[in-house]
Image (cartoon, grey):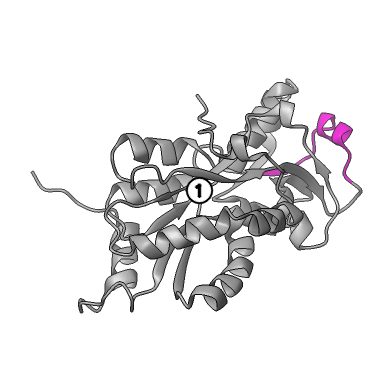
Amino acid sequence: MKFFLPLSLVLLLLALGGSGSVVSASEQPLRIAVASNFTPVLKKLLVEFHQQTKINTQVISGATGTLFLQIKHGAPFDIFIAADSARPAQLEQQNLVLANSRHTYALGQLALLSMTSSARLSDLHKVPQRFAIANPDTAPYGKAAKQALKYLNIWSQYQPKLIQGINVNQTFAQIRSQAVNSGLVANSQLVLNNLTGVIIPPAYHQAIAQQLVIIKSSDNINNAQRLSDYLRSAAVQQKIVDWGYASFGNNEQEQSHDQP
């Protein structure tokens, strides 16, 4: 039986290791697969991380579901920084990650953003002509958006109006450019871009517990562990909260936050 890799994965493998030459772990960059919502924050943090450790990094950003599938098919990442807990847990169950490497590093917040008016929670009951969310099947913030609209019993009214981005960054770009007037995005995107919206109450959707795992097949595990430790340090955790994520205690941080 022949097995064919998806074209996107083939291109990714070529991009990450196309030279075919043998490079030691100390020379090759730490390959970070990161959920799109956290990418802008991570890039800010990696400046300090490099200053402290001299570790070079390579960031590959995308929807959590897409990165998850690439890892399952053998993409050569060292660490996976997801936007949910379900995919890291699945990789752990499939024995694809380093033992005891799964940790929560952030608690995401969903927010309503409008570029044409001041957003209010009650606006959700006024169904617009078009409304932007990320793809609920691959993007955790899209899944949370769908859950919130279902919680309010308005999902069926919104379905024909939805413009779905491949990830929450694309959804944010659609709203900011006013290609779509309003939608549900990550609160961190509002904070980083000095925009005003309204945070969706956490009771409206399952917790967006964002977890990271170290890939078991990585040949750069020590550096991946250093990044994991850095992201979960008290000082960095405060920065993450300042950039629009919710705060959580140390005990909660180590819980799995698995969602059904």
Question: Residue 39, located in which quarter of the rendered image?
Answer: bottom right
- Mark 1 surroundings: few (<14), some (14-19) or many (≥20) residues within 10 A: many
Most foreground residue, 231 or 86: 231
Residue 177, can we see it?
A: no
Range shown magenta? 119-133
Image coordinates of residue 8 in percent, x first then y, are 35, 59
- 123 or 93, nearer to the observer: 93
Q: Tell which residue pokes out farthest to the left in this image.
A: 1
Between 123 and 212, which is closer to the camera in this rendering? Answer: 212
- Quarter holding the N terminus is top left
Residue drawn where x is 68% and y is 55% of the image: 240
* Rendering coords of residue 23 (x, y %): 25, 77
- SS category of the residue bearing label 1: loop
Question: Residue drawn at (28%, 40%), measured in percent from left and top?
Answer: 95
Confirm whether residue 14 shows in the render: yes
User: For mark 1, what is the residue?
Assistant: 82
**Residue 92: percent from the left, percent from the top?**
35, 39
Q: Amino acid at mark 1?
A: Ala
Q: Residue placed at 49% from the left, 56% from the top? A: 228
Comparing 171 with 190, the one in front is 190
Q: Is residue 211 left or right of residue 68?
A: right
